[in-house]
Image (spheres, grey):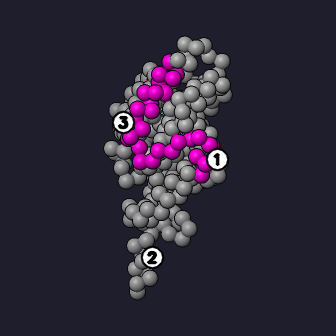
Amino acid sequence: MADTIIESGTLARRGLMFILSSPSGAGKTTIAHRLLKEEGAALRMSVSVTTRPMRPGEVDGVDYVFTDRPGFERMVEEDAFLEYAEVFGHWYGTPRAEIRAGLKVGQDYIFDIDWQGTQQLYQRAQGDVVRVFLLPPSIEALEQRLRSRATDSDEVIESRMARAKSEISHWDAYDYVVINDDIETCFRKVKMILEAERLRRLRQVGLIDFARQLMR
Ligand code: 5GP
């Protein structure tokens, strides 16, 4: 960690991996996009590799790096992933090289990954990981959000609700849990978590020299 260089304020700081998870419909995407907009270059989205087909409007290399199954398996063999998991029949993974290099120079990353990925990342890189989980204010509010954003049949909505409930069951594997009953308040809380985590002593690797100077 001693070779961390980027200046944050005045002191060198190691970057962090900010994981934002939630059942779909609880506002994760809105919060993540806003954070990315406000933070500019200080916070980057980690772009995952996936075997799932590209959806209309998605851009290769921006939303995901799209690959096929053999391509993904090759990356697994090369140990190119920090974590990977099968989600709804497709494979998703977080590429290791860029993140490792970025963290060293104080780059922060935001992750939109599920609980399995969160667990793996935490096991591999505990000290760099901050886990935040968003909950809806009520199950009715969640259902309303899922209904309002798609023209899906009741059957599809029901299966989404079942999936959301199973995602909620992992709430206690996170460092922070924020109930999203108001998007502004929720955003402010998430931002405070990010700011506070950046100030952790162990991340501020420039402190050793700074404190030495003060004590000279
Ligand atoms: P979608 O295909 O709708 O973009 O994403 C489906 C699910 O895969 C989401 O729950 C998302 O959080 C998860 N996901 C996306 N990228 C990764 C990844 O790199 N690792 C893991 N473990 N999950 C991911």
Q: Is residue 74 magenta?
A: no
Name which residue lies at 50% across and 69% down. 11
**How many C-alpha atoms fall within 10 Å of the one at disc 1: few (<14), some, or many (≥20)?**
few
Name which residue lies at 62% across and 39% down. 30
Question: Is 14 above or below relative to 186?
Answer: below
Name which residue lies at 61% across and 28% down. 145
Q: Are marks 3 and 1 in contact (CB under 8 Å)?
A: no
The amino acid marked with disc number 1 is Glu
Name the image quarter holding the N terminus: bottom left
**How many C-alpha atoms fall within 10 Å of the one at disc 2: few (<14), some, or many (≥20)?**
few
Q: Are marks 3 and 2 in contact (CB under 8 Å)?
A: no
Q: What segment is highlighted magenta in the picture? A: 159-188
Residue linked to disc 2? 210
Q: Are marks 1 and 2 in contact (CB under 8 Å)?
A: no
Relative image position of residue 18 (x, y in whole percent):
48, 48
* Rendered image: mark on residue 184: 1
Q: Does mark 2's beta carbon lie closer than 8 Å to ligand 1?
A: no
3D distance between C-alphas at marks 1 and 2: 36 Å
Q: State the SS at label 1.
A: helix
The amino acid marked with disc number 2 is Phe
Residue linked to disc 3? 78
